[in-house]
Image (cartoon, rainbow, N blue to C red):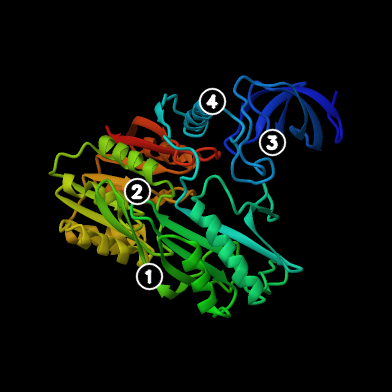
Amino acid sequence: MALKKNDEIKLNIDSVTPLGSAVGRYAGMAVFVRNAVPGDEILAHIIKTSKNYAVGIVREILVPSPSRIPSDCPVSDKCGGCSFRNIDYSAELAAKKDFVEQNIRRIGHMDFEAEDIIGADETCFYRNKAEYPVRIENGSFTAGFYAFKSHRVVPADSCRLQPPEFSSGIRAFEQWALKSKVDSFDEKTGKGLLRHIYFRKAFATGQIMACAVINGRTIPNPELLVSLLKSAVPGLKSVAVNINQKNTNVILGSETEIIWGSDKITDILLGKKFVISPESFYQVNRSQCEKLYSCVAQFACLTGTETVLDMYCGAGTIGLTLADKCRALYGVEIVEQAVENARENAAINGITNAHFIAADAFKGAELLVKKGALPDVVILDPPRKGCQKELFDIIYNLGVKKIVYVSCNSATLARDLEILNSKGYRLKRLKAVDMFPRTAHVEAVSLVEKI
């Protein structure tokens, strides 16, 4: 019998998707249900149907899964962030390892088993970065995160993924905004000043950066904001205003003004210091990042004689942790501010064999060829969309023998591994790293070698 909207059905949940929705089957049709857990038997209320699938919500849990646990967050069923707040962590890790393997099999067309996933020691309060959308209506201030597949803000100023200093900072921003009669940005009209509140924390040093993302050039009463933040946030090192006047979903604009303190904060990874600017890419989970970079070093297996090319190098974090293990390191990154940070990071760590180029991948490779710096090993850490197909032609033409590919999206990793496979490169090792506990995201590291 075909499912219709508002039907209520018994459903056995057998799996979960990489987006965090649980899946059961009814008369052969997949039914996607948020907040269910594999192993649950539920009563599902159908809210959407199509030819090939249906979407439901949990009306009642008839038989709970052995993996089900009580959520420790009051808004986890509404917020789009933590998909695994109600599932045992060992089951979460198993699901994430399976996500990676299934993508490699389904998209990359390779039957390859991943090594044991690297789990986290801490699953709460680990994020060193948070961007809170803001809504101010009728004298009421809300900062939180977007609901699942929505731009409706769910109040979450005490999120269990963020350090407690961020919650104190949110309350300081609230006092400033209400006293200064600041309005919030309206996506429909393009009017209103305050778009997001943005924090970064360097866990090793305790330094914190606070930033207001605004639809304008200046903020009212900046001295009041600084004073409130200094009183509320231990370790405050910097207060900034980021200017974003574009009609876009991109959170940060290209221009940042420091209104108090330093323009950077400093963290430590694997014994090396790294400065972080507001716009710089930096992994959000420091302790898991150290495990990830250690995995990269293990896969690269450097002997001290190699030339290493770090593509999409950002502030140089991966490459610089490998610099003492290779003969020469070259980093290529299109964001000039990040390249400046990478050069500064090399200098403060006394690293002299590292060279950074502000260019896209193609121009960077061209410059390397002119320098005669042909890499033996390439490190890839692209954004979620993966690499441009043409980059693999460049890597092939450079004669690269070994690639270590770090990915935050195993679907595009699988796509790119299939392209590399067609060029004579073979997947040798694959490991998932849980950089984002309690969320549906998972990092993957792969070793690929030329045959």
Q: Relative to 115, does residue 142 appear above or below in the rendering?
A: below
Q: Give the number of the disc on residue 263.
A: 1
Instruction: Pick the quarter of the image with the N terminus.
Output: top right
Q: Amino acid at mark 3?
A: Arg
Residue 168 is left or right of residue 191, and the answer is left
Residue 181 at x, y percent in the picture? 67, 76
**Quadrant of the rendered image containing residue 447:** top left
**Element carrying mark 2:** helix
Q: Which residue is mark 3?
A: 34
Labels 3 and 2: the sequence-earlier one: 3
Residue nearest the viewer, comparing 356 with 271: 271
Separation of residues labelled 3 and 4 (CA atoms) = 16 Å
Q: Which residue is mark 4?
A: 91
Q: Which residue is mark 2?
A: 393
Residue 182 at x, y percent in the picture? 65, 74
Residue nearest the viewer, comparing 398 with 339: 339
**Element carrying mark 1:** loop
Q: Are marks 3 and 4 in contact (CB under 8 Å)?
A: no
**Element carrying mark 4:** helix
* Residue 368, visible in the rendered structure: yes
Labels 2 and 1: the sequence-earlier one: 1
Q: Amino acid at mark 4?
A: Ala
Could you tell me how many numbered marks the image carries? Answer: 4
Q: Are marks 2 and 1 in contact (CB under 8 Å)?
A: no
Separation of residues labelled 2 and 1 (CA atoms) = 39 Å
Q: Residues within 10 Å of mark 1 (few under 14, many from 20)?
A: some
* Residue 398, visible in the rendered structure: no
Separation of residues labelled 1 and 3 (CA atoms) = 41 Å
Residue nearest the viewer, comparing 156 with 298: 156
